[in-house]
Image (tube, rainbow, N blue to C red):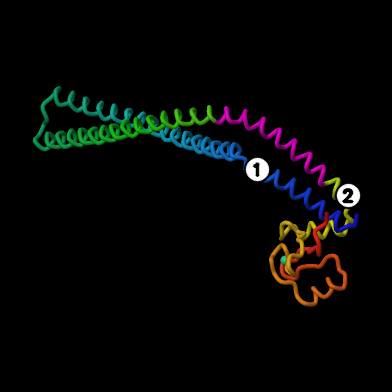
Amino acid sequence: MNELTMLWRYQQADMDADRADREIRGAPNRLKLLKDRDFLLEQQNTMRKIESDLAAMAERIEALTVDVSKVDESLRDLQDTLEEAEPESLDIARKSLDYCQKLMHSIGRMEQELQKIRKDSDVRAKQQHEVRVRAARVKVEFDKLKVTYDKEYKEQSGALEVLRKKAAQTAQDVPASLLEKYKSIKKHKIPPIAILTDDRCGGCNMNLPAVVMRSIRMGAESVECENCGRIVLVSKPD
Ligand SMILES: [Zn+2]
């Protein structure tokens, strides 16, 4: 068997293994799992964001509650002072009233903020619950599919290993320089070896130049396609 036939056989084995590899990577269950995994990671990030929002809100509620009780206390002190003795002058009475209004106003403002935060906090808590339920549902689906896929993957990768071994065995019959050439063409063109078809390169379908056709008529068994760089075999090996 000549080296071009060996190379052709190697290409067939190599392409078979590559196809199996592509099938593994493009397996619907694998793609679904990857999608589910990304979704779960996204939910985790959302959960973390919600948790930190809730913590910040709780902290703000606590601070506001302390402030409200302080202002409340000031208000009570003022009330006590006014009850103990009548204001000495109208001016003092007016100032006390202003102060009282200021305190009431700031309590009102803080209570408004508290109300808003509690509302926002409820919304976030509801979202948290929804995310949790959604993520749990997908996780169950993911775990179930993972069991099926792991089995499937084991079988597929076993089959791929057999094909790779077969290709490696076939490669042993191909001269090293030819194999190197094959690998270097494969980086750009797949499959790297084509068959001459009606004076055209079977890979890119371009007509081979007259000078190349002449060398074929002179007995060359293979030529290089100037257009795509493939090795073109003049006839398909058995
Ligand atoms: Zn070509």
- Cβ of mark 1 under 8 Å from ligand 1: the answer is no
Magenta part of the chain: 142-167
What secondary structure prevails in the magenta region?
helix
Query: Which residue of the protein is positioned furthest toward the left in this rendering?
Result: 90
Verify whether residue 137 appears in magenta: no
* Residue density around tag 1, few if under 14, some if 14–19, many if 20 or more, within 10 Å: few
Question: SS of the residue at dot 2?
Answer: loop
Picture quadrant where residue 83 is located: top left
Closer to the camera, 234 or 85? 234
Q: Quadrant of the C terminus?
A: bottom right
What residue is drawn where x is 22% and y is 34%? 108
Q: Which residue is mark 1?
A: 25
What amino acid type should be assigned to the residue bearing mark 2? Gln
Horizontal side of 70 relative to 220 (left or right) equals: left
In this rendering, which labeled residue sits more in front, label 2 or label 1? 2
In magenta segment, residue 161: yes
Q: Left or right of 10: which side holds 69?
A: left
